[in-house]
């Protein structure tokens, strides 16, 4: 069937691997007690929620009903009703969507690789570690306790720098410490972890070092240490103020991490701020260490993108299961969008691409043409001089 006979949304959901999803559904037996809405219909409905950025289960139902004949192309028999959507959001296991995200990521990963802005000279995997907090109303989400009068969930994330997508994520209540989330992922030997100083725990850093992992972070203020070696700064690394080998000198830290560490002091030319980086990598240039920490901005950008472009700051269900389903389906939706972004010849920004898709969601357009040439190119007007010559010759 010609792609021009399919809606843009149908072509986007065709990227979803049905075989991989079927295996996940079988593993969790998630179609049992489905109340007429199977797992695939649920998945497509949630992707529609995020891309269309609708506000409620009623909007999901009415929005899909408006598609009429396009539903068969989505693999859906009929649009789910409001009551059925409310039931399955509360009762279908959120682990189905988490497992499918990683299965789909594994399938699409070769198409997601991008050129590194920083650390391109390193032949190692680079992981960016951070978490983000999503505020909730405690009176509605009473399970998500964070402060006395405030609720929240925290998304602990390990971002693969080469794809710009999470290779690990965990959704917890807002009280869970960032460090506990970071410990949940098994990092490949020889890889590099880039993280802020919230993750500075010298027992954990010593454990990473013993496993053959490298880390780049910022030293905490007030940390006691002793300088044992000072290195000369090359003239071409003008932003680097100091490069030193140190050993920790605190009564506890010196015991848990007795090995030599490296301290790089760097002045950001754009902001004028002086940053002090801590690492166990002692052979790379000081500039390379500073550049690696700049790569950490990618995970901040990822959190900003997913919060601003998808439906992740407000939720269509109030149970813990419903919130986790919505967060994991947002991961699936951002994976699809990044796949399209990498495939397109036109230089889209992610927010503009999502906005344009949202406007043309059920329009019957060729997706490849839409991605490569989104705007109509007018033909230049005829040259009046040339036209006059043609009239004279006639």
Image: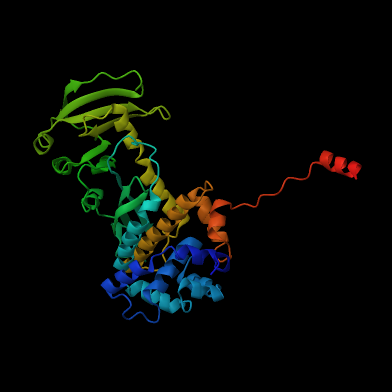
Q: Is residue 244 left or right of residue 10?
A: left
Report the quarter where the C terminus lies: top right
Residue at left offset 45%, top offset 62%: 50
Q: Is residue 14 left or right of residue 183?
A: right
Residue at left offset 19%, top offset 32%: 223
The reply to whether residue 150 is visible in this rendering is: no
Q: Quadrant of residue 38?
A: bottom left
Question: Vertical placement of 248 versus 187: above or below?
Answer: above
Q: Quadrant of residue 22?
A: bottom left
Residue at left offset 43%, top offset 78%: 83
Question: Vertical placement of 53 versus 205: above or below?
Answer: below
Q: Position of residue 341 (x, y in %)?
A: 47, 51
Q: Position of residue 222 (x, y in %)?
A: 21, 32
Residue at left offset 31%, top offset 75%: 30
The reply to whether residue 338 is visible in this rendering is: yes
Q: Quadrant of residue 331?
A: bottom left
């Amino acid at each position: 069937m010609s792609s021009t006979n399919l809606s843009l949304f149908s072509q986007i959901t065709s990227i979803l691997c049905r075989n991989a999803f079927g295996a996940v559904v079988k593993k969790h037996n998630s179609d049992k007690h489905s109340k007429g809405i199977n797992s695939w219909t649920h998945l497509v409905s949630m992707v529609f929620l995020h891309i269309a950025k609708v506000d409620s289960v009623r909007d999901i139902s009415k929005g899909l009903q408006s598609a009429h004949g396009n539903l068969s192309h989505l693999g859906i028999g009929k649009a789910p009703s409001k009551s059925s959507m409310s039931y399955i959001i509360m009762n279908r296991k959120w682990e189905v969507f988490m497992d499918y995200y990683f299965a789909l990521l594994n399938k699409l990963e070769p198409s997601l690789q991008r050129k590194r802005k920083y650390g391109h000279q390193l032949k190692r995997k680079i992981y960016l570690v951070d978490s983000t907090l999503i505020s909730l109303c405690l009176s509605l989400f009473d399970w998500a306790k964070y402060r006395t009068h405030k609720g929240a969930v925290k998304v602990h994330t390990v971002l693969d720098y080469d794809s710009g997508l999470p290779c690990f994520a965990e959704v917890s209540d807002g009280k869970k410490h960032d460090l506990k989330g970071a410990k949940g992922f098994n990092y490949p030997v020889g890889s590099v972890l880039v993280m802020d100083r919230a993750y500075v725990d010298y027992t954990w850093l010593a454990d990473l070092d013993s496993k053959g992992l490298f880390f780049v972070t910022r030293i905490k203020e007030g940390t006691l240490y002793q300088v044992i070696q000072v290195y000369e700064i090359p003239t071409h690394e003008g932003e680097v103020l100091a490069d030193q080998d140190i050993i920790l000198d605190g009564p506890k830290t010196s015991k848990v991490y007795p090995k030599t560490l490296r301290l790089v002091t760097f002045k950001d030319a754009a902001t004028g701020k002086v940053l002090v980086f801590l690492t166990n990598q002692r052979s790379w240039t000081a500039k390379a260490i500073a550049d690696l920490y700049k790569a950490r901005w990618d995970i901040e950008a990822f959190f900003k993108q997913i919060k601003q472009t998808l439906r992740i700051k407000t939720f269509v269900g109030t149970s813990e299961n419903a919130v986790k389903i919505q967060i994991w389906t947002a991961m699936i939706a951002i994976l699809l969008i990044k796949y399209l972004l990498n495939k397109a010849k036109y230089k889209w920004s992610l927010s503009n691409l999502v906005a344009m898709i949202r406007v043309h969601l059920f329009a019957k357009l060729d997706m490849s043409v839409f991605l490569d040439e989104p705007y109509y190119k007018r033909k230049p007007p005829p040259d009046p001089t040339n036209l006059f010559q043609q009239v004279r010759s006639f």
